[in-house]
Amino acid sequence: MRTRITALTAVLLLLLAGCAGGGDGADDGRITLRFQSLAWQQESVAANEELVAEWNAAHPDIHVEYVQGSWDSVHDQLLTSFEGGEAPDIIHDASDDLADFAYGGYLADLGGLLPERLRSDIPASSWETVTFGDGVYGVPFLQEPRVLIADAERLAEADVRTPTVERPWSWAEFREVTKVLSGPGRYGVAWPLKEPVSASLNLSLSAGGQLFHRGADGKVTVRVEAGDEVVPRTIHDQVNTDRSASPTTLGSGGSDTLPGFFGGTYAMVPLGFSYRQQIEQQAPEGFEWRVLPAPAGAEGLTQGVSPQTLSVAQDSAHKEEAVAFLAFLLQPRNMVRLALGDWMLPTGRTALRDPALRTEEDGWAVGTALAGHLRSAPAQSVRGYAEWKDKVATPAFQEYYSGAIGAGELRERLEEDGNLVLARYQR
């Protein structure tokens, strides 16, 4: 009994000591910063954890605690933590998730805190993705273009022109190629469109699509124009008219299409650049695949991106120290490590020049050649975008691509229903 009482007393003392330390560190004055990372691939998690350990070893007075988050639930989780006063100091997210948090006052304006080296190394087009009003509410550090992953043998057998960054397929040519690559039980392309909105909007920039238009009064409305119709019409016609795209993958995620791709059911799959890691790891022995640029439109290879970002919570008591950690994490050599771990592209110009990111192997050179064509996603600064996407655009695009509704009804729902949603956020 005496031993158990002694042990219980020791536990209580430890708990009391932990409570007394608070969130800013122990009694020795050490600052503790909580860094919530959304890294999930093994290489990426390892790179992040290694960099945190290196920072902690070099900065004994500013300890960074690594906290694992999840892309699946990050928006709701952050909203709850902001409202509850328990947000991490340093927040990993994506730029298209920041608008409501920035306008809601949950994120710190980093404009006057970031070192000039970091500001000047990242292009203005990337900074646009994290600028809301007059403030800068995150640092964009990783990005990925959408590319075509192709079965090299199927392309060679069909004797079709292989596109390059210098001579990409047009959207019309892409449609014709997928017809050639189709046959009994085989499709030229599989569109994994479980989340159809970002793919549709971001690829539409190549055809001049914008969809969201800001008026003289500063308010944003949805207006479907000719450039917005090119990509959705191509996908719709491949599925419903040409039968060159699989209808069964429309509700799938990217990973779900890989078994069919490896098995020869699909000749090509449009995917984010980072999917190359899964393909490299899972492809059967002898299977040859290639990375091709996405089709080009009136605006060439332009496409929208929502970079991964690092922000600082407005409630953080140590904003300058948090920004110092960001500056360390995003030094060019470290940005390269993070990019390689996630199989993505860094936003920094210096990091992009690293030879490790410019090899032909696994299509790295294609990706880096596309970096200059990446622009801020159309919905980047639109308040209410998350609700518009979930309640209006996602079901409308899904029904259109499946053939359940036509282009007219798609337009009507995006514009009329969509503008009712956006209006509530702009009163």
Image (tube, rainbow, N blue to C red):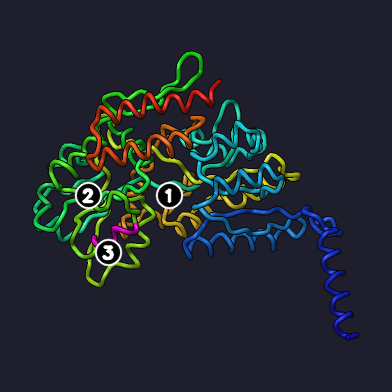
Looking at the rendered image, the quarter that the C terminus falls into is: top right
- Whether residue 184 is visible: yes
- Give the residue pinned by disc 3: 259
In this view, which residue lies farthest toward the top?
Answer: 216
* 212 versus 130 height, above or below: above
In terms of secondary structure, what is the magenta stretch mainly?
A: helix
Secondary structure beneath dot 1 equals: strand
Could you say which is closer to the camera, residue 199 or residue 111? 199
Three-letter amino acid code at disc 3?
A: Pro
* 224 versus 161 height, above or below: above
Query: Disc 3 to disc 1, how far (Cα)?
Result: 26 Å
335 vs 78, left or right, is left
423 vs 313, left or right, is left
Earlier sequence position, callout 3 versus callout 1: 3
- Whether residue 166 is visible: no
Earlier sequence position, callout 2 versus callout 3: 2
Residue at the spot 36% in from the left edge and 23% down from the top edge: 223
Three-letter amino acid code at disc 2?
A: Pro
Looking at the rendered image, the quarter that the N terminus falls into is: bottom right
Which portion, as a residue range, is magenta? 255-261
Membership of 236 in magenta stretch:
no
* 340 versus 211 height, above or below: below
Q: Residue 90: x, y in percent?
A: 64, 48
392 vs 287, left or right, is right
Q: Residue 369: x, y in percent?
A: 33, 45
- Give the residue pinned by disc 2: 247
Q: Nearer the viewer, mark 2 or mark 3?
A: 2
